[in-house]
Image (cartoon, rainbow, N blue to C red):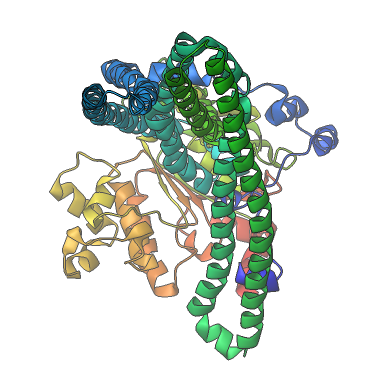
Amino acid sequence: MLWSMQQQKQHASNEEEEFAGHKSGISSARTSNLKRLSNSSSCSGLSTCLEDMTGTASEPIKKPSSFHKLLALNAPEWKKAIVGSGCAVVFGAVYPVYAFVLGSMISAFFIRDHQEMKSKIRTYDLIFFSLCVVSFTVNLVQHYNFAAMGELVTKRIRESMLTKLLTFEVGWFDKEENSSGAICSKLANEANVVKSLVADRISLTIQTCTAVLLAIALGLWVAWRLAVVMIAIQPLTILCFYTRKVLLKNMSKKSGEAQNQASQIAAEAVANHRTITAFCSNDRILSLFRATQAKNRKDGIRQSWLAGFGIGSAQSLTFLTWGLDYWYGGKLVHEGLITSADVFKTFFILLSTGRIIAEAGSMTSDLAKGSAALKSVFEILYRVTKINPDDPPGTKPVRIQGNIEFNNVAFAYPSRPDVVVLKDFSLKVKAGSSIALVGPSGSGKSTIVALVERFYDPLKGKIMIDGTDVKKFNLRCLRERIALVGQEPVLFGGSIRDNILFGRPNATEAEIMEAARAANAHDFISNLKDGYETYCGERGVQLSGGQKQRIAIARAIIKNPAILLLDEATSALDGESEKVVQEALDRVMVGRTSVMVAHRLSTIWSAECIAVIEDGVIVEQGGHQDLMSRGGAFFNLVKLQQQQ
């Protein structure tokens, strides 16, 4: 925040086609550009496909009716719900009963017979003690059952959400609103909001309804004339209690937010002390801090005046309504219609009701948050994925040979449908052969790898593996026979062994070591203090880039894939690490269909075939010597890199 006040944000432009770059920056779709693009595109039927991507074909999302679906989700805990609700009813009844007994006890002090007064007060004391025991017991049972129910439903929601999220197509995650931060926030925060709704709000609602209904019934039974008047002015009493509670809550919240802003400036100043000192920015930081503090002080004073006026008015109106109640009650006593004891009973009964309703009313914002969280949760749980990895009717191949064929494929990313990446793209890769895809950034190389993995579906044309459209395969089965090694190896926060086993969980120790040797990783792993049990750290931060890449290769090898996809697997490494990793790749590519995306042309000399891609089409294809002898696009790329 500190630097955002002083520096303008800089936006790096992303590569149009690269899958990794595509994940990092996403622009919104524009329908007007779509129509212009589709008119100029050479792909027949492409405009229809693009328009479908923008939303003219509605996404299959079931409209959730949140509350009854929440109850259905909570069905396994129906016993806890019944017990907790029963206790909430009893506890809600305690308030008006307590008020009734309190009013009765006050009238007992006006009894002239000392013994009768003593007897009455002793009776009321026993009733109060009984109410104390009942309140403690039912509160304990109620909160246990609702809390347990809330924890279980939170666990179920998080597990169900994560299970569902893992089935969604990659294109769904490319949308800005479905970023990793937003998804993690939903898993962490919205599940907790739902828990609060289940554990606290439902019980409070039941208590409030019980207390209000019983209080009105008791008030009308004791002194219906006075009760009718008090009920008529009850909204004013409720408004007073509610206003005071909300104003105090808002004051506390705004004060906290203001202090957080100042604290954040101070924290960033301390964390970046060297930079501030180097630029002699001490005075500037202090000025920012003082300005924030001054603004907080002015806002605090203004809020205090408003809150004081609001709370004072609410309190005055409260006293005014009480005075009206007592005046009318005294009038009824004077006329002989009710007794003084009835006045006290009715007053305390309905007074407690106003406070209870006000407390329940102050949670309306929490209920709104809970409703929004429920809607967000069920939009995920009831969404139908466009690319189902567990499609039951899909073909489950026992083994695949590795023949790959692209037939007139057209493709644009769902988040950028106005940018056509592949146009009538056709390519054949024979089983067991290797092909290198080269070309300028944004030409569509990494997109081809993503389409083979079926991270996305093409807008037009077919992608075939062993003569079968990839859409007809059971996707999870197909992906078990394909391995992908990317530019940035993704390691998880576990041991090296765990990360290699991620490729095939049931692999033996011997198979793990064999895969590591094939990836040129066994020697450096053995030299580590904990060997294969070495903790990699989050995203593999404990290891170097070359070490991480070799572990990623070992993870791919242990799958024994028929198709190996290498998406610039060595481009982020230094020369020495690149040499070691390239040796491992050359070894594991033997006998497998290998598709290499390469930026450094020195890494693809061993490829049997090289395809040069520009603007989503193949402009040249052939062996290394053949392409060099032609003096075409590949020759120019090689010369350009040599000059650089």
User: Is residue 316 shown above or below 343?
Assistant: below
Query: Toward which corner of the image does residue 34 lie, by quadrant?
Result: top right
* Residue shown at the point (49%, 11%) measured from the top left: 220
Image quarter in which the C terminus is found: bottom right
Furthest-front residue in view?
112
User: Along the line of sight, which residue is nearer the eye, 516 or 173?
Assistant: 173
* Residue shown at the point (38%, 24%) measured from the top left: 107
User: Along the line of sight, which residue is nearer the eye, 408 or 169?
Assistant: 169
User: Along the line of sight, which residue is nearer the eye, 552 or 118?
Assistant: 118
* Residue 109 picture location, percent across and down: 34, 29
Image quarter in which the N terminus is found: bottom right
User: Is residue 573 shown above or below 116?
Assistant: below
Q: Is residue 200 left or right of residue 455?
A: left
Residue 468 visible within the image: no
Q: Is residue 628 left or right of residue 39?
A: left
Q: Is residue 108 left or right of residue 524?
A: right
* Residue 370 picture location, percent across and down: 51, 32
* Residue 419 picture location, percent across and down: 73, 43
Residue 493 visible within the image: yes
Query: Toward which corner of the image does residue 289 lie, by quadrant?
Result: bottom right
* Residue 11 picture location, percent across and down: 68, 62
